[in-house]
Image (spheres, rainbow, N blue to C red):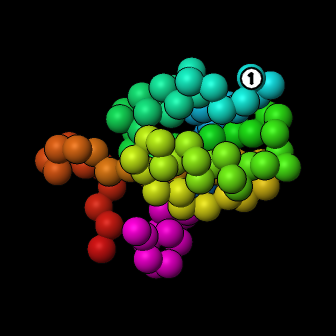
Amino acid sequence: MLTSKQRAALSSLANDLNPVVFLGKAGAAEGVSEALDRALSDHELVKLRFVDFKGERKELARELAEKAGADLVRVIGHVAIIYRPAADPEKRKIKLA
């Protein structure tokens, strides 16, 4: 569980990021979950853009983050910011207080 200060720090780090995972007409299919899991393993902090299902974006973002074992940082507009620290503490790029 992230604190509000950690969420704010992660949100500011995500400002410069481009969306890596896109959720389109296929919905939250297994391919999207796998892509999100792979992106989180590579980057720790990921933006997910909702191309479709915009009305359900908060629920879908929460569901996808939970499935990936990650924290939903924030949903802004049609973009969700998701964070999962690297499994190996020495490989972590983002240090949270």
Viewed as shown, does residue 76 lie left or right of 63? right
Q: Secondary structure at mark 1?
A: loop
The residue located at (54%, 61%) in the rendering is 73
Q: Which SS type dominates the magenta stretch?
A: helix
Q: Position of residue 93 (x, y in %)?
A: 30, 49
Q: Give above or below for 38 relative to 11.
A: above
Viewed as shown, does residue 75 lie left or right of 38? right
Could you tell me which quadrant the C terminus lies in?
Answer: bottom left
Look at label 1 and name its amino acid: Ala
Q: Residues within 10 Å of mark 1 (few under 14, many from 20)?
A: few
Q: Which residue is mark 1?
A: 26
The residue located at (47%, 42%) in the rendering is 67
Q: Give above or below for 28 relative to 46.
A: above
Could you tell me which quadrant the N terminus lies in?
Answer: bottom left
The answer to which of 76 and 25 lies nearer the viewer is 25
Q: Is residue 14 visible?
A: no
Q: Give above or below for 75 relative to 6.
A: above
Q: Quadrant of residue 53?
A: top right
Q: Is residue 74 visible?
A: yes
- Residue 22 among magenta residues: no
Q: Position of residue 46 (x, y in %)?
A: 51, 43
Q: How many marks?
A: 1
The answer to which of 20 and 75 lies nearer the viewer is 75
The answer to which of 40 and 61 lies nearer the viewer is 61
Q: Quadrant of residue 26?
A: top right
The residue located at (58%, 33%) in the rendering is 20
Q: Which residues are magenta?
A: 1-12
The residue located at (75%, 39%) in the rendering is 50
Q: Position of residue 14 (x, y in %)?
A: 55, 53
Viewed as shown, does residue 12 lie left or right of 51? left
